[in-house]
Image: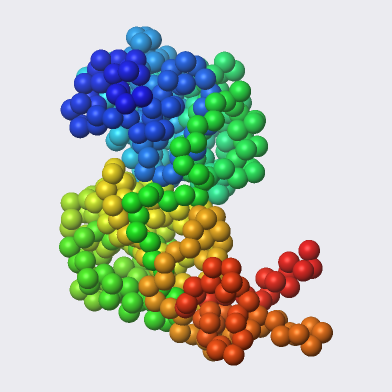
Amino acid sequence: MTDFSMLGLKPKLLDVLKEIGIETPTPIQARAIPEVMNGRDVMGLAQTGTGKTLAFGLPLMHMALTDGTKPSPKTVRALILAPTRELVNQIADGLFPFIKGSHLKLNRVVGGVSINAQINRLDRGTDILVATPGRLMDLIDRKAVRLNETSFLVLDEADQMLDMGFIHALRKLVPMLAQERQTMLFSATMSKQMSEIAQSYLTSPVRIEVSPPGKAADKIDQEVHFIPQPDKLDKLKELLATHKDELALVFSRTKHGAERMSKQLQAAGFAAGSIHGNKSQGQRERTLKEAKSGKITVLVATDVAARGIDIPAVRHVYNYELPNVPENFVHRIGRTARAGRDGKAIAFCSPTELDDFRAIEKVMKIRIPIATPASWAADGMKAEPKPKPQGGRRRGGGGGGGPRGANSGNKPRGAKQGGRAGAPKAGGHQQRQKRRG
């Protein structure tokens, strides 16, 4: 399927696609749209940045335009749930051009803004509602919205929704929907819990997988710097200085860390801003607007924003601190190389993050090229102690956490298995745990 006109979409939708310059459907769009329009439940697995919003949005709008009737007061016909405010806004902004000038009503509800204004908009009925689970539950508790006529449900970035603890809200929301409904679940990864969610809420779904779970976009050039934690900030400044006019996204593990790093970069002369959970919705929106306009060239963020930042101009993604959930690494670096562009993803790995790094490589099924070899042999041995010899045998050929090949006398265990010069070994304590079963 190489043309949107072959998918049977309404002429109005095709006209808007042409206006905004989208000519060819992405693989997830080409495969999902016909199935949704045929009434099938869909489980879509695709890496971030592959066009999932239009994969479910276009058929939803097509069916709403075909129906032609107006929703009853306080009811919702199609519900799209997303884990973050940024992602809700991104989805709503992406769909709005298609319904402009039509009878369709599209609303969004997120926390951090006036709930009274949202109550007023929902009172007139909604064709398509994009919402975060928490704020939607608040509105339901206030009897501002009813879901008993909701016959379409979309769970977007469903794996992140589960990671953020929205499973309890989901279990409360789904029984409120119409019994006869069509459900679509879109995710970049498929965990055991995700499979259980699909079995619970989808009926004989068609599974559409356009890239293996955990696979990053092909146009992302990756590298890793093995560097002690205290040296990371100086290294970041050094690398940022090489592309001051190109937008960079820097990921921190914590809200306080992101705010502190933003101020440190500003003090060093970089046009930096931050986005995290301690920021109000207005502050987050202003910062994103400044990043899109070029006023900010370094955006420091936490994982809460990883799924909702859609700025095509992001050329560089820095994992200043590695996530302890490997799949989040894929979502982070998926903020670059979007819409056919290329991009670069740079990871910093300290001695204490070696286990996280190895888990990331395992999930992605790749070996990330080394830009800076490890230089912390002594620190690494402290952080990850060498296992004690058993039965008089030498194990590992050197201190765990030190650079591979650092000892010239004995070849390190693991060098035969694709060992790379300068790549630290995983800690010996992991080997002991495996032997214990």
Give above or below for 336 relative to 248: above
Res 222 visible: yes
Q: Quadrant of the N terminus?
A: top left
Point out residue 340 in the picture as x, y percentages from the top left corner.
28, 44
Query: Residue at left 24%, top 76%?
Result: 268
Q: Residue at x 53, y 82 (%)?
A: 405
Above/below status of 383 relative to 160: below
Rendering coords of residue 418 (x, y %): 54, 68
Locate the C terminus by quadrant: bottom right
Residue 419 in the image, given as x and y percentages of width and height: 53, 72
Q: How many marks?
A: 0
In the displayed structure, 368 sits above or below 137; it is below
Name the foreground residue: 79 vs 294: 294
Kindly identify the residue that appears in the image at 24 percent across and 59 percent down. 247
Residue 9 as seen in the image, left or right of residue 354: left
Which residue is at the front of the view, 411 or 283? 411
Q: Is residue 386 left or right of residue 70?
A: right
Residue 66 picture quarter: top left
Of 29 and 129, the residue lying toward us: 29
Q: Does residue 155 appear in this view? A: no
Q: Position of residue 148 (x, y in %)?
A: 54, 19
Indicate how the structure is coloured in the image: rainbow
Residues 165 and 361: in front is 361
> Residue, x 17% and y 63% (percent of image)?
245
Asked if 140 appears above or below 286 in the picture, the reply is above
The extreme right residue here reads 391
Q: In this image, 66 relative to 272: left or right?
A: right
